[in-house]
Amino acid sequence: MTHPGFGEYQDFGDAMGSEPEPGSESGSGSEVGAGSAPGPGSDMGSGSARGPGSAPALGSGPGPGSGLGHGHGHGPGSARPPSASADGADNHPGSGDRPPLAHRVPDLGSMELLLAVARLGSLGRAARELGITQPAASSRIRSMERRLGVALVDRSPRGSRLTDAGALVTDWARQVVEAAEAFDAGAQALRGRRDSRLRVAASMTIAEYLLPGWLIALSGQRPGTAVSLLAGNSAAVAQRLLSGEADLGFVEGLAVPDGLDGVVIGHDRLVVVAAPTHPWARRRRPVAARELAEAHLILRERGSGTRQVLDAALAGHGGLADPLLELSSTTAVKAAAVSGAGPSVLSELALGEELASRRLVKIPVDGVRLSRDLRAVWPTGPRPTGPARDLLSLTRPAREGG
């Protein structure tokens, strides 16, 4: 029979011709199995009660002018899946008691298989196209039929043909698969946007002496990724990460800043240096920790990893005296020390050229440990992905060597 609102599709009861499943009851007010012809006022679909004149559930025989699905009628020519009313409200009595949607709706793989059967007219060819065995494909179709409560495919030696119900379900499945493809395309676009740039924030020592080599290696792996580097002290790096201005950070200090997760990528040693003309450069015995604490040094600013380590190391020796100069870059501190203005404490990583040329000399110190960890950091949560993950992997040699 021709069903108003669905063209030439037969009603599901006539098309399927199935009997109620064993143990089910039909008749007035009873529950009806998939594909059976329910009596007036029977319970249908997911067990919700429907009175006379209501729209029957998928698989029951609809009356003239009724809609197919979960109790929502559609006008002539409508092919909207039976999900919700036009205003988006779920009109099912007791719908809050139904299992989650994932337990009621077939998975995407099964829907893709049904579409392939419809297109190719053969379950075997559909299975080969999707890279699964024919028994596995048959099992998926049977599982889909059990879940929906209707027969979807007629199988014969001549091939596989969709039932009328199967044709309608295929139309709905096509909409779901197309929506999933759009979802996947959107996710790929998000990944592409993420992968097109990398914002790095790093403390001065790492930014000047370690990151350049890592970034050159990263550009070889990801030539399409634009990298920006913001250099500052460790406190500024943490602030940029927490405010979303950077994707990955590198800091020097005693601990991971609050609100961040991190991993140690290496170790660094701070050394006391002075110009060869400074009195400390000519003495034979080491400088004592208290003497270092009382000296007026040329130092990095508060908030820098170098200053944090020095403050902590000398806290038990009277604390750090007021600095002679407080400068915001390692280069400026070195220049002031080379000029003979006074001694300084700097990362050994930053002093290779100056020590080799003897523009600065190391000053032995006794009774204090001046070392620190170098860390990669990111906002608390999942580890970095995309270019940030790749840059983090390039620090492995430093971690293994440290």
Image (tube, rainbow, N blue to C red):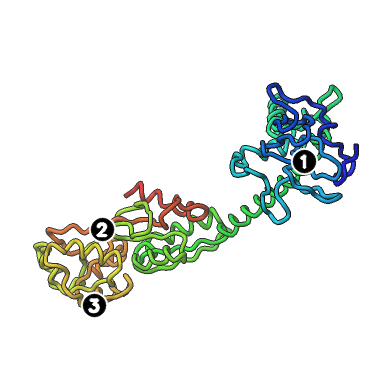
- The x and y percentages for residue 36 are 77, 29
Of badges 3 and 1, nearer the viewer stands: 1
Q: Nearer the viewer, residue 5 or 384?
A: 5
Q: Residues within 10 Å of mark 1 (few under 14, many from 20)?
A: few
Mark 3 or 1, nearer chain start: 1
Mark 2 and mark 1 in contact (Cβ < 8 Å)? no
Q: Which residue is mark 2?
A: 269
Mark 3 or 2, nearer chain start: 2
Spatial CA span between label 1 and label 2: 85 Å
Mark 1 or 2, nearer chain start: 1
Spatial CA span between label 3 and label 1: 91 Å
Q: Is residue 316 visible?
A: yes
Q: Is residue 293 above or below residue 220?
A: below
Q: Quadrant of residue 375?
A: bottom left
Which kind of residue does numbered mark 3 sit on? Leu
For image coordinates 48% across by 63% down, the residue present is 199
Q: Which residue is mark 3?
A: 325
For image coordinates 65% across by 50% down, the residue present is 184
Q: Nearer the viewer, residue 211 or 130?
A: 130
Give the side of residue 149 with respect to residue 331, left or right: right
Q: Residues within 10 Å of mark 3 (few under 14, many from 20)?
A: some
Q: Which residue is mark 1?
A: 52
Which kind of residue does numbered mark 2 sit on? Arg
